[in-house]
Image (cartoon, rainbow, N blue to C red):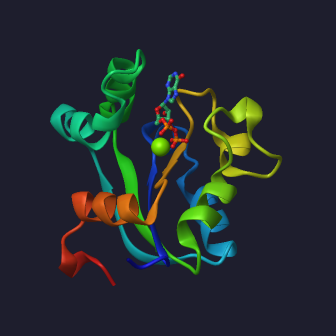
Amino acid sequence: MRTDRTFTMLKPDSVEKGHVGAILEKINASGFRIVAMKLTQMTTADAKEFYAVHSERPFYGELVEYMTRGPIVAAILEKDNAVDDFRTLIGATNPADAAEGTIRKLYAASIGENAVHGSDSDENAAIEGAFHFAGREMF
Ligand code: IDP
Ligand code: MG
């Protein structure tokens, strides 16, 4: 299992607020190479499947609604230790708990609308990247 790739989404709130450029700048400045990237919108079925692990949580409906309400920027990123380093860069799920200078501290409004996704394991990074991109879209 490779350890140098992760998957991210700049969520609908980031696109709506015009934060895409600033967030990508931070990602590049932190040493991640963009392997794949696109503006896309998840269907309800897509979001339900992507977040299936959370299907029993009380916020699942709200999460699916949020993630489908507008376009996202989906991307695969490459760097040594990508999953952990990217989770550090984005900060805690709840921006109130996120460290200073992290993407969620800077750009997230709440625990629900928290600006960015980052894979939580090498295995999920591969699954999530393949969910959004065909092999020919990865560079
Ligand atoms: P993560 O994105 O930091 O990995 P997860 O626990 O995997 O956090 O949750 C997935 C997403 O579900 C979060 O990024 C956030 O958008 C949403 N979420 C998590 N916890 C809550 C909550 O308590 N209320 C509302 N939405 C939540
Ligand atoms: Mg997660």
Res 54 → quadrant: top left
Q: How many marks?
A: 0
Residue at the front extreme? 1
Please name whichever residue, 89 or 106, is drawn nearer the observer in this view of the structure.
89
- Left or right of 96: which side holds 58? left
Please name whichever residue, 81 or 61, is drawn nearer the observer in this view of the structure.
81
User: Looking at the image, is 22 positioned above or below residue 104?
Assistant: below
- x then y, percent, for residue 78: 49, 77
User: Looking at the image, is 97 positioned above or below residue 5?
Assistant: above
Residue ID at (33%, 66%): 126
User: Looking at the image, is 97 positioned above or below residue 25?
Assistant: above
Residue at the right extreme? 100
Residue ID at (27%, 37%): 47
Res 133 → quadrant: bottom left
Residue ID at (20%, 41%): 46
- x then y, percent, for residue 28: 61, 73
